Image (cartoon, grey):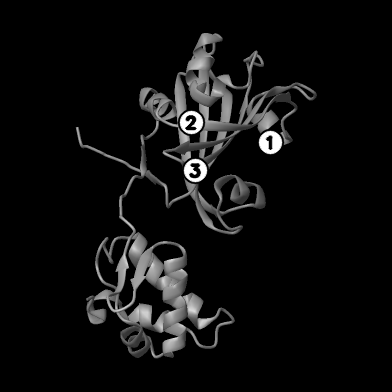
Amino acid sequence: MSDTTTLFSEQDLENLNKESPTPLYFQLYSLLKARILDGTLPFGQRMPTEEQLASTFGVSRITAKRAMDELAGEELVERRRGKGSHITYRYSPRPVQAPLTGMLQEIESMARNSSAKILECKMLQPPQHIRDELELEAGATALHLVRVREREGRRFGYYVSWTAGVKMPKSRRIFERTPRLTYFRDNGLEVTHVTQTLSAEAASPEAAKALGVPVGSPLLSLVRRSYNKVGEREHLRDHLRVLYNPENFQYKMDLKID
């Protein structure tokens, strides 16, 4: 049986707020679920009893029971009369690993080892700020592509791109498996320089729906600008904005001093 004194921090205990509009049972359920999903409570381990949870968090046994019932309803724990509740969820971290700026081959590799659902693929007039960056005249169009990329059934990225200098493909399905960089090269557009900007933002309704997360959830934001050099001057040819679900994606950097 788990020792609650080593499972929950002081902050955990303080986070259960009786003044919050969120029901206490749901607050407790959410905390326990987080400990199961992050592997603190491993597969097969016996959960603290309802009495232990009630005593540890200063709640009623009814509140503790309802929290455990919610976990059982999601098949995270199995409850057996006389034997207690045991963890049935197996922790298995499988974050998608992504490269840093300019590692185009690895970017393509990530694309090949995941699949994409195409939400939009059309030649459209970009908004003003994109049109200016792509150096397009008013009324000119660019390839607009919106995708959700997933790996092993886990949706990790919402991709929105505008690309100048390429034609509309014969079938939008080409982007379900073919990396965009490969398509660019096949159509005479060679990327010679890439810049990336990382930040964070809250999930918009569109991104939330695509990634299956609540509106307002924190997402990792990446803007990738890909350039083609003609003579001595670089021209932006592709503007890509990606919103990553941090639960399914890690952006890993490995830096060395020469």
Q: Position of residue 57 (x, y in %)?
A: 37, 86
Question: What amino acid type should be assigned to the residue bearing mark 1?
Answer: His
Query: Which is more N-terminal, label 1 or label 3?
Result: 1
Q: Answer above or below: position of 75 versus 198.
A: below
Q: Which residue is mark 3?
A: 155
Q: Quadrant of the image for the N terminus?
A: bottom left
Left or right: residue 229 versus residue 105 is right
Q: From where the camera sits, is residue 229 visible? A: no
For label 2, the SS is strand
User: Could you say which is closer to the camera, residue 39 or residue 237?
Assistant: 39
Q: Are marks 2 and 1 in contact (CB under 8 Å)?
A: no
Mark 2 to mark 1 CA distance (whole Å): 29 Å
Q: Position of residue 30 (x, y in %)?
A: 45, 70
Question: What amino acid type should be assigned to the residue bearing mark 3?
Answer: Arg
Q: Position of residue 87 (x, y in %)?
A: 31, 65
User: Could you say which is closer to the camera, residue 212 or residue 135?
Assistant: 212
Q: Position of residue 159 (x, y in %)?
A: 56, 36
Q: Which residue is mark 1?
A: 129
Q: From where the camera sits, is residue 161 visible? A: yes
Residue 115 numbered tag: 2
Q: Nearer the viewer, mark 2 or mark 1?
A: 2
For label 3, the SS is strand
Write down the quadrant of residue 88 in the picture.
bottom left
Q: Quadrant of the image for the C terminus?
A: top left
Q: Are marks 2 and 3 in contact (CB under 8 Å)?
A: no
Q: Residue at x 37, y 22 (%)?
A: 105
Mark 3 to mark 1 CA distance (whole Å): 28 Å
Q: Nearer the viewer, mark 3 or mark 1?
A: 3
Q: Residue at x 45, y 62 (%)?
A: 74
Query: Which is more N-terminal, label 1 or label 2?
Result: 2
User: Could you say which is closer to the camera, residue 254 or residue 118?
Assistant: 118
